[in-house]
Amino acid sequence: MILLSSDADLGARLQAACPAQWRLRQASDVAVLGDFADILQYRFLLLDLEDPAFDPLDAIDTLRRELMLNIAIICLGGDAALRDAARLARADRFFGREEAVGVMQLFCAQYDW
């Protein structure tokens, strides 16, 4: 899975709770993740909507429109207006940042095929 966030603490908490057979890749720029084929290898992406290091709506646009990827985009945090904008940009699910570990574990279990 991918964590698109520059928050080192969030990344550390998720890495510590990550199931053994899973790998978490953290980045704050979609461009460093590679091309279509590289990103497609991941089952889902956790997107930090509150990260000031990048524009989360631009990240969604890059993934959906430019790269034409259908990877699940699970958003963490954000107020109602930002979540609505992310929903219109075609993000998939929305959770509070405090739910990050539980959400990550839930999706790991659902995508463990």
Image: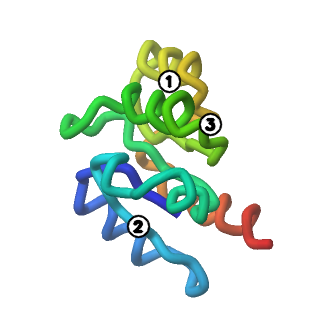
Residue labelled with disc 1: 86
Q: Residue at x 63, y 35 (%)?
A: 92
Q: Residue at x 56, y 86 (%)?
A: 20
| Near-viewer residue (49 or 43) | 43
User: 10 Å neighbourhood of mark 1: few (<14), some, or many (≥20)?
Assistant: many
How is colour applied across the structure in the image? rainbow
Q: Residue at x 60, y 26 (%)?
A: 90
Q: Secondary structure at mark 2?
A: strand
Pinpoint residue 46: horizontal percent, then vertical percent: 49, 50
| Residue farthest to the left, as pictured | 53
Quadrant including the C terminus: bottom right
Pinpoint residue 75: horizontal percent, then vertical percent: 50, 39
Residue labelled with disc 2: 25
Kind of residue sitting beneath label 1: Ala
First reached walking from the N terminus: tag 1 or tag 2:
2
Foreground mark, 1 or 3, reads 1
Q: CA distance from mark 1 to mark 2?
A: 22 Å
User: 10 Å neighbourhood of mark 2: few (<14), some, or many (≥20)?
Assistant: some
Q: CA distance from mark 3 to mark 2?
A: 19 Å
Q: Residue at x 52, y 57 (%)?
A: 39
Residue labelled with disc 3: 93
Kind of residue sitting beneath label 3: Arg
Q: CA distance from mark 1 to mark 3?
A: 10 Å
52 relative to 4, above or below: above
| Residue farthest to the bottom, as pictured | 20
| Near-viewer residue (93 or 97) | 93
91 relative to 20, above or below: above
Quarter of the figure with residue 95? top right
